[in-house]
Amino acid sequence: MLPGRGERVAVVGCGTSLFVGRAYAVLREAAGAGLTDAFPASEFPLGRDYDKVVTISRSGTTTEVLDVPDMLGDRVPTVAITADPASPVLDHAGHSVVLDFADERSVVQTRFATSTLALLRAHPGHDLGPVIAAAGEAVDAALPEGAPGREPVHLPRARLDRRPGARGRTQDARGRAGPVGVLPGDGVSPRTHEHQR
């Protein structure tokens, strides 16, 4: 179901999923597995010939991603990679890979992107062992000299709202407000959940 060696492949996605697709395209071509292009879903070139089209969408609800298999119809086999087993993309693509263990609800969603890239790297035969070992070493390593530890975390393009009754809220450059958490050592950091308006 995932692209085989020698197949001409297009990968489509939006946001982080597009970046995963671009990384996969470079890795697949470097491995000599075949021509691989990556496009924002809204810019997919319908006139090009591909042997397979892979759509990547964590939620599987991105309209532009849903449109690509529909526009291709039965002309080109499609494979959807998603995290949601109830996702609408499953009804649009011919085949699917559901990474339900990688679904998450957070502001910065990295589990799906990392898992998808690992899957796509491993499929054509890349050895993930060295990458996994390097990640473990990075996590275990001491922080470089001068790296922030327990100091205040500065919020880029945001300011701490000190008005009476604000109770530790941030406000970004667009005026959107969100909660703030305190790190050990009295640092300040935004919490990792949805901003409240």
Image: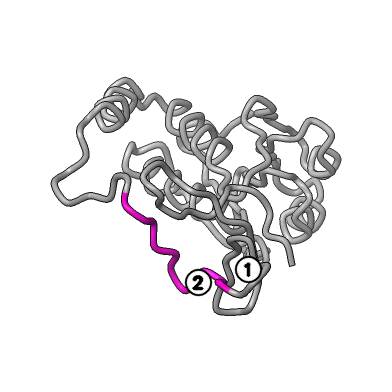
Vertical order, 168 against 193 (above or below): below
Residue 60 position in % (x across, y down): 75, 45
> What's the image's color scheme?
one colour
Residue that appears at 67% across and 59% down: 195
Quarter of the rendering containing residue 85: top right
Amino acid, disc 1: Glu
User: Looking at the figure, which quarter contains the C terminus?
Assistant: bottom right
Q: In which quadrant of the rendered view does residue 167 lie?
A: bottom right
Q: Residue at x 52, y 46 (%)?
A: 8
Direction front: furthest residue:
164
Secondary structure, magenta segment, majority class:
loop
Reading the image, the residue beneath label 1 is: 43
Left/right of residue 94 with respect to residue 131 in the rendered view: right
Amino acid carrying mark 2 in the image = Ala
Q: Is residue 155 magenta?
A: yes
Q: Quadrant of the N terminus?
A: top right
Which mark is first along the chain, 2 or 1?
1
Image coordinates for residue 29, horizontal then vertical, percent: 37, 44
**Vertical side of 53 occupied by 131: above or below:** above
Residue denoted by label 2: 158
The x, y position of residue 42, in whole percent, is: 67, 66
